[in-house]
Amino acid sequence: MKPVLFEVQDLSVRAGNFMLSDISFSLEAGQYFIVLGPTGCGKTMLLETLAGLRNPIRGEIFLQGQAITSLPPEARQFGFAYQDSLLYPFLTVKENIFFGARAQKRHQEQEILHRADNLVEVMGIAALLDRYPSSLSGGEKQRVSLARALLTYPPLLLLDEPLASLDPQTHRSMQELLREIHRKEGLGIIHVTHDFNEALQLGTDLLVMNHGKVLQQGKPSDVFLQPSSLDIANFLLGENLLEGTIEWREGRAWFKQDGSDLAIGPLDVGKIPKKEAKKITLLIRAGDLMLSRQNENEHTGHNSWCSVIERIEFNSTHIEVVCAGQGRYRVILSRSEWKRLDLQIGSPVRISVHTDDIHIIQN
Amino acid sequence: MVSKQKSKAEKRRKPSPFYCFFWLILISLVMFLAVLIYGLISYGNWGAIMAIIRDPEFHFSLTFTLRTSMIATFFAALAAIPSGYLLARCKKPGMVLIDTLLDIPIVLPPLISGIALLILFGPLLGGYLTKLGLDMVFSPRGVVAAQWFIATPYAIKAIKQAFEAVDSRMENVARTLGFRPAMVFWRVTIPLSKNGLISGMIMAWTRALGEFGATAMLAGITRMKTETLSVAIFLNMSIGELEFAVSTAIVMLVISLAVLIALKVFLRNEVKV
C-alpha cells in the first residue's frame, strides 16, 4: 500500500448561505482523484479550500502527514488550473509558464529550465512561447495553464473542470494529455468535474458530492455500477431505474416491477438493504441489457422479456435503443451488433439481463 | 446579383422605432454640446486668447491649477487605490455603509463641502495645523485639500469598478504559484486593471482641474495666491473682464479635450485582453 499523500478530515467551509460539510477523504501518491458533482454543489469551493484560498471553519488538511490547514496558498504551492485557464494577458506564453518559478525565484535554476523544456515539448506548445494568450485557442491556453501549474514540481495538482469548455476534439486530446502527465509525473491529482464519463475515463478514485456533502466514495466503476442512493443513480444518468417491490418465493427474493407483470431475479439477498423493506429500486445499465430478435430467443431465461423498439438514437460510437413494453428500457448496442440484428422502429425484440448486472439501489 | 438582393433586403428591413428614438436622443445631446462649444469658441477672439496666454495672471493660474490638481490627484490615488480595492473585493454587509459614506462628497454641493472643510481645518484642527506649519485655510494647501476632497470619491468609484472587472481567480492562481498578497496586487491586479486605473485617475484629475466651490470656501478667492483657472474666470467675470474669462474658459476646454482624446487613443492602442 502506497503512503498517504494528502488527507482531508471533517472539512467544513462556509460561503454566505452555502456550506461544505464534513468532507473527508485521502489520496495516495499517484492517485488520480475525481470529485464529481453537479454545477453549484461546492466542487470549486472545495478545491479552493484545499489550495488555501478559503479558510475552513472546521476540519484539518494534511500533506504527507503534516497539518497544512493554516498555511497560505503560497506556502502550499499546489498546482492549480481553472476551467478557463486564466492566463495573464499581459504576459507571453513563456512568461506565463515561468510566472510561478519567478515568484519562487527559481526561474534561472537549471532544473527548472530543463523542466520547462520538457513540459513545453510534452504539451506541444513550443511554437507558442512568444505569443500572447489572446491569440491562442482554448486547448492551447489550457496546455499553457497546465505547464504553468506543473513547472515547479507541485506536490499536488488541483484541476477545476479543466476540460469543460473545450470542443470535443480538443477535449479528447487534453484528456489523453492529462492521462500521460499523470502516468509520467506520478503526482497526485484532484480533478473536479460534473462529467461522469470524464470521471470514469480518468479517475482511479471517485468522490461524488452534492449540496456541499459527500454522497459516495469509491472506485469510479464501482460507483457507476453500484450507486449508493437514487440521487447518485439519477446524477450518474442511470439509464434503467426500475421501481417495484420484493416478493419472497421459497426463500429467494424476486423483483416485481410496479405496473407490469415483469419479475426479475432471484436477487442477491445479501444486497437487499432491509429484509422487511418491500419497496425497492433496481439499476440496470443500458450497456448490460442484451437485445435479440423476438423469434430468435438468443438470451432466453428467467430475466428476459418481450418489448418493442420505440426510438433509435445513433451516436458516433454506439447505438442507443429505447424499447417500450413491460416498462421503458434503454439499451446500448455496438455498431456490429446493430447491423447483425437489423432492427427498425416497431420491431418486436426480447430484452434480457444477467442477474449479476442487476444492482439494488437503497432508497 | 447577390449584392442587389442584399440591398433590396436591407431596404425592406425597417429601422426599429426603439433604436430610432435612442439615436434621436444621442444626436440631440451631441448637437447640444457641439453648439455649446461652438458658442464659447466663437465668442472669444484669437488675439485675446494669445494675449491671455502671455498674461502673468493667466500664467500663474494655469500653472497653479496644473500643480495643485496633480498633487490632489496623486493624493486621491493614494486614498482611492486601497479603498477601491477593498470595496471591490470585500463583500461584507458593512461595506455598503462605507461605500455610501465615501459617496457623500459627490452628492454634497461643493459649497457645503467647502464649509465643512473650512470648519474642520479652521476651528477644529486649525491650531494644531498652524503649529505644524500646515495651514490649510486661505492657503494654496487648502486648494489641494479641496480638490482632493472633491476628486477622491470619483477616483474611488472608477478604481473600484476597475478592480471589480479583474477576475479574482487570476489573483488566486498567482497565490497558488507562490506570490504573497502584496506581490499579487502589484504583479497581477494592477496590470490587469491598468486601463481602468488610468481612466479613474484622469477623471479625478479633470474633476480637480475644474473645482471651484469647495476651493473658494476653504482657500478663498485671492488673486495670484489661490487663483486657480476656475477662480480666475470667476474673478474676471465679476469685474466685467468677459474677454479674459471666455479666453480662459476656451483654454481650459482645449486642455480637457486634449486630455480626453489622448486618453481614449492611449486606451484604444493598449493590447486588447
Image (tube, rainbow, N blue to C red):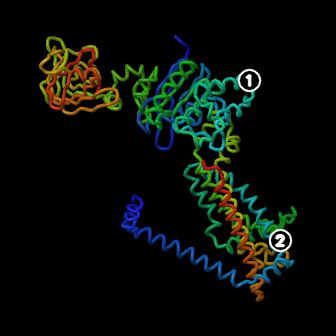
Q: Residues within 10 Å of mark 1 (few under 14, many from 20)?
A: few
- Considering depth in this image, is B85 or B56 the residue closer to the camera? B56
Depth check, front residue: B130 or B263: B263
**On the picture, is B7 further left or further right than A45?**
left
The residue at 63%/67% (across/down) is B106
Nearest-to-viewer mark from 2 and 1: 1
**Residue at the disc numbered 2:** B139
Residue highlighted by disc 1? A110
Residue B100 versus residue A237 in the image, above or below: below
Residue A315 visible in the current orientation: yes
Dot 2 falls on a residue whose secondary structure is: loop
Label 2 crowding class (10 Å Cα cut-off): few <14, some 14-19, many 20+?
Answer: some
Residue A175 in the image: state x and y as whole percent: 48, 27
Image quarter for residue A315? top left
Residue drawn where x is 38% and y is 20% of the image:
A221
Tell me which amino acid carries mark 2. Answer: Ser
Q: Position of residue B231 (x, y in %)?
A: 76, 77
Name above or below for residue B248 compared with residue A17.
below
Which image quadrant is residue B116 in? bottom right
The x and y percentages for residue A245 are: 18, 24
Image quadrant containing the N terminus of chain B: bottom left
Task: Provide the chain ID for the residue under circle 1.
Answer: A
Amino acid type, label 1: Gln
